[in-house]
Image (cartoon, grey):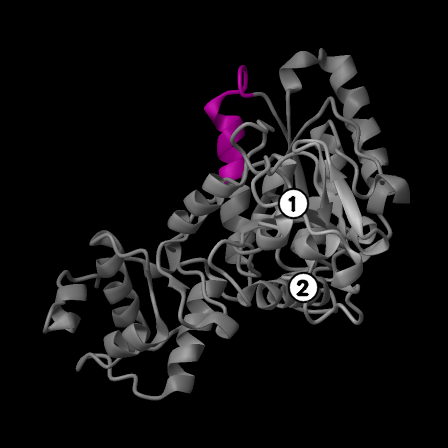
Amino acid sequence: MPEDLTSHVFSKSTVNTPSNLYALCELWDFAGQREFYATHQAFLTSSAVYLVVADMKDDIRKPELSQCFADFQHVGEYVEFWFDSIHCHRTDDERATNGYFHPPILLVFTGKDKYDKADFEKRQTELTYQIDQAFGFRSKFHHLHKKFYLSNLKDTDEEFENLRSEIYKTAKNMDNWGNLFPLKWVLLEHLIEINKNNGKNFINFTEMSKLAKHSDINILNADDLLLFLRFQHTVGNIIFFENIRDLIILNPQWLADAFRCLVSDRVDNSKLYHRCVVFRTKGFGSKCSGIYSKVKQLIEEIKEKYQVKISSKLHFKCSDGDYYKDTFEYDTLTNNQECFCPQHQTAHLSEQIYSPWMDNEVKEIPDRAKINTTQDDQNPGELYNVTM
């Protein structure tokens, strides 16, 4: 850590640099597969310009209620989902004087080269009509600033420069462009970059407080530090949530890579977890019911914070079977004293499978004296799934 941090950061003169023309930016390319959508909220902020990209051959339609949790097959069916997600991060409930909501969206359609001139103009008209019909009269529509139609194969650099220019112009019109910030914030941000470059991907709040107490920074008050961390999260430099202060992600790419290890866009039941959360209970003992309570509480907090619908079901598994097949639904277990397990070709006691997890939920436990003991009596349920 540099002792003279100020001279280390401002070692070169910037007197002749037109600072109002430049800004640092981060470019994020989110995975388009449905399985990754639940991870995106950790990265979305109100201080961003969003490019929603779709193939122009795909229709954009408002899904029916029955389709809300369907496995959509085309990119066009996801456009409304992205608008909803971005709308959750709007900076105000009232539109700005220019008639738009922030953060702004640029809608980019690709595949222009697949149409001749006449068909292209017809398709443009069709897509404009579909967008209006899907959500033209709802508030989320007003995040849309402009539409672009591009070909990755045939368009010249000038066409893409028009998109770059629009991104710059849109960002420049946002409220946070050109704002002045305390010098100590710049210095602390530089210390964060040093830690990131040294391979440190996350720290806790105590460690961050020590960085903030550097003699050139001297941020001593916890509330002042929290204000800095909130800003850094908003602009995408770090990932920080106040309810989990002891995990401050310095390198957002590290978190993205961690998500990638847990989520897959292809289902391979022999080795991948798909649309479920799985916990092994060996050695957990009485902590099982606590884990369930925490997961349940987290789901409720996500639903309330982001105003999203989450459909979930509880599934349980016997201790030594394959996790991805022959699971038992909670309702089935509670309505039957025993459940037949196809893998073991025997019946398992329902209570032994679910009770370690549902200790706080179960009101009455069956009389064990009236139930024949099986081998599972000493080996309770080992896997727990929440299917989303």
Residue tagged 2: 296
The residue type indicated by label 2 comes to Lys
For the image, the number of numbered tags is 2
Judge by depth and name the residue closer to the eye, 353 or 242: 353
Across and down, in percent, residue 180 comes to 39, 73
Q: Secondary structure at mark 2?
A: helix
Q: Quadrant of residue 198?
A: bottom left
Mark 1 vs 2, N-terminal side: 2
Q: Main secondary structure of the magenta part?
A: helix
Residue 188 image point, x, y percent: 28, 71
**Depth order, front residue of 379/155:** 379
Label 2 neighbourhood size at 10 Å, few (<14), some (14-19), many (20+)? few
Q: Which residues are magenta?
A: 152-164
Q: Residue at x 82, y 49 (%)?
A: 332
Q: From the viewer's perspective, is 10 left or right of 168?
A: left
Q: Is residue 220 above or below residue 95?
A: below
Q: Would you say residue 114 sits in the magenta stretch?
A: no
Q: Quadrant of residue 365?
A: bottom right
* Residue 317 numbered tag: 1
Q: Foreground: 308 or 364? A: 364
Q: Nearer the viewer, mark 1 or mark 2?
A: 1
Label 1 sits on what residue type?
Lys
Q: Position of residue 352 (x, y in %)?
A: 67, 55
**Residue farthest toward the bottom in the current orientation of the protein:** 221
Instruction: Quarter of the image for the N terminus: give it.
Output: bottom left
Q: Position of residue 337 (x, y in %)?
A: 81, 53
